[in-house]
Amino acid sequence: HESLNLAALWKLPIIYLIVNNGYGMGTAVAEGAAEPDLYKRGHAFRMHGERVDGRDVLAVREAVLRLRRRAKDEHEPAILEAFSFRFRGHSVIDADRYRDAEEIKQGRAADPITLFAQQLLKAQVVDNTWLKETTDRVEREIQEAIDFADQSPAPKQEALYDHIYATPISNMPGQVEAAKLVQQLSKGR
């Protein structure tokens, strides 16, 4: 709220993008938020807000361009809520039992990558050969990144908090070394 307030007060040309996949961890937004239309969160600060179908690449592009022009011309912030679908649970330990099979089926049917590829094919911007070659190349790049991560050594405990902050943590008296902090946290388990 503080960021929204200051952006509105100082008329900062910021676009806040909220990607709303319908859930906050495992709780449906409609059950966990008194106002489930998240783009309205800026109304208390007299901030413009819009919602867009985040699964529609061209609609998102249009909304961002429109809000960018608005931010540039009027020097005011805005909120853009992009409604989307979460393809997996919140984390690797999330069994995703709070969604039924039909919701998952409908969400996967609206996969933005698949839908945009179909739009490009229909408009004859690309052909099936280009699409397959691009898909294969991207899948290879992803697999190479996974292999690199799997083959890389785990970071040393004392380096766990390196490069997290630009400057040392200001509220830590005397600045605790990362290794000591890790040890202290480990003892508490």
Image (cartoon, rainbow, N blue to C red):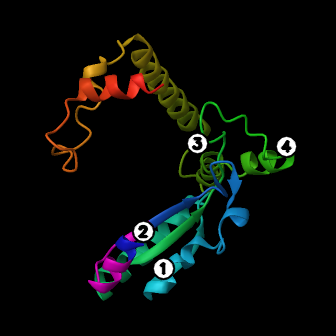
Q: Name the residue beneath numbered marker 2.
A: 16
Label 3 secondary element: loop
Give the distance between the C-alpha atoms of the residues marked 1 and 2, in whole angstroms. Answer: 10 Å
Q: Are marks 1 and 4 in contact (CB under 8 Å)?
A: no
N-terminal-most mark, 3 or 2: 2
Q: In x, y percent, where is residue 87?
A: 66, 42
Range drawn in magenta: 5-16
Q: In the image, which is nearer the foreground, mark 4 or mark 3? A: 4
Vertically, is 6 above or below 26? Answer: below
- For label 2, the crowd category at 10 Å Cα-Cα, with few meaning under 14, some 14 to 19 and many 20 or more, is some
At 73% from the left edge and 45% from the top edge, which residue is drawn? 108
Give the distance between the C-alpha atoms of the residues marked 2 and 4, in whole angstroms. Answer: 32 Å
N-terminal-most mark, 1 or 2: 2
N-terminal-most mark, 3 or 1: 1
Q: In the image, which is nearer the foreground, mark 3 or mark 2? A: 2
Horizontal side, residue 38 vs residue 101: left or right: left
N-terminal-most mark, 1 or 4: 1
* Magenta run includes residue 13: yes
Q: Name the residue beneath numbered marker 3.
A: 127
N-terminal-most mark, 2 or 4: 2
Residue type (three-letter) at the residue carrying disc 2: Tyr
At 49% from the left edge and 21% from the top edge, which residue is drawn? 143
Give the distance between the C-alpha atoms of the residues marked 1 and 4, in whole angstroms. Answer: 34 Å
Q: In x, y percent, where is residue 156?
A: 29, 17
Horizontal side, residue 54 vs residue 159: left or right: right
